[in-house]
Image (cartoon, helix red, strand yellow):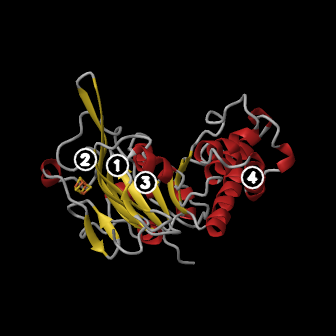
Amino acid sequence: MEQGNILEVKHLHKRFSSKGVTVKAVTDVSFNVKPGETIGIVGESGCGKTTLGRCIVHAYDASEGEVMYRTRAGEEVDFLKVDKKKRKEIRKEIQMIFQDPYSSLDPRMTVLDIIKEPLKANYPRMPKAEMDRRVKDMAQKVGLNPSYLMRYPHAFSGGQRQRIGIARALVVGPQIIVCDEAVSALDVSIQAQVINLLRDLQKDMNLTYLFISHDLSVVEHISDKVGVMYLGRLIEFSKTEDLFEKPLHPYTEALLSAVPVADPTVQMERIALEGEIPNPANTPSGCFFHTRCRYCTEKCRECAPDARELKPGHYVACHYAEELNLKGFSYEE
Ligand code: SF4
């Protein structure tokens, strides 16, 4: 691994096969993450971003590729190739937060028991009093009143349930959190509170986030770097500001043009994306985006573009990225 990286995703593929049909959910995705960074992963629904997150936490077995991870003890491991015992150890350090906290919280368990569950699973010999102390500390950190811990999940609002989900993920002391649409189900005002909480926790606990979302405004707000996925491929990856100001891929340009801008003086030409995302069981020839790209040529239909580093840290997979001069956001006053 490169010095200074906590995570390196290398040529990751995930295919699902059923009844003779193979769906390519993730195709050849690579990117690096430094400790303390927040990486946003965006794209329309069905683009493979959730599958990518699940492969990284090893909830799914990837079909090919590596997820190199630097453990808290400084060891470099390929998380996809470790044995069962090691995987369990590493799972403590790489946790996931889900979109719908309600469905992931057992309605028959008290909140105390829900947050305690990962401690019991990972530290079976920890004394009960110590577990209870850790759960109470964690509840306080995420803004839950410890005197409510004996209640059941139905007694809590959506925002509070997401706080319970966050506490459960953090109680085992992870380094990396994969947040899968973690605020998408919440009202906008509650979204802001949960995002601020995630930021505070990041500073406080030295966390690294992989923030998966279809919502570009949320991702812009929270991420240091952003990766854009289309049909299972990472088609652009760069620092957030560069990607929003000067996108290099036509798909990113189209996504940005559809983001609502609060300032009425900012005029954005909305680029309509024609048609639906193609069926991942029957991907287009050449560039996967060619069926919806307004800059498509014969070359695009025939030949798939490789990801290239066009500017330092700015990767793009488009044959014409240098020439297109695409529109992004302007941050100037
Ligand atoms: Fe569009 Fe061609 Fe670039 Fe693909 S390679 S994004 S089809 S211009």
User: Residue 211: where, in percent of width, then height?
Assistant: 51, 55
Queried on whether the Cβ of the residue with tag 2 lies below 8 angstroms from ligand 1, the answer reads yes
Sort mark 3 into few (<14), some (14-19) or many (20+) by Cα contacts within 10 Å. many
Disc 1: which residue = 230
Q: In the displayed structure, does residue 105 sit left or right of residue 152?
A: left
> Is 239 on the left or on the right of 19, as rendered?
right
Query: Dots 3 and 4: beta carbons under 8 Å?
Result: no
Tell whether label 4 touches label 1 (CB within 8 Å): no
Give amino acid for label 4. Answer: Glu
**In what quadrant of the picture does the C terminus appear?**
bottom right
At numbered mark 3, what does the secondary structure look like: helix, strand or loop? Answer: helix
Mark 3 — residue? 255
| Residue at x 50%, y 65% (from the top left corner) | 72
Q: Quadrant of residue 204?
A: bottom right
- Residue 141 locus on image (x, y percent): 74, 59
Is disc 1 placed on a helix, strand or loop?
strand
- Work out how far the residue at label 4 is from the one at label 2, CA to CA, in angstroms: 53 Å
- Which residue is located at x 24 percent, y 34 percent? 282
Screen quadrant of the N terminus: bottom left
Q: Nearer the viewer, residue 238 or 7?
A: 7
Q: Amino acid at mark 3?
A: Leu
Circle number at residue 130 = 4
Residue 270 seen in the figure: no
Secondary element at image label 2: loop
Q: Nearer the viewer, residue 196 or 54?
A: 54
- Pinpoint residue 92: horizontal percent, then vertical percent: 54, 52
Mark 2 Cα within 10 Å, few/some/many (few <14, many 20+)?
Answer: many
Sooner in the amino-acid sequence: mark 3 or mark 4: 4
The circle drawn on residue 288 is: 2
Question: How far apart are the two marked residues, 3 and 1, measured between alpha carbons?
Answer: 11 Å
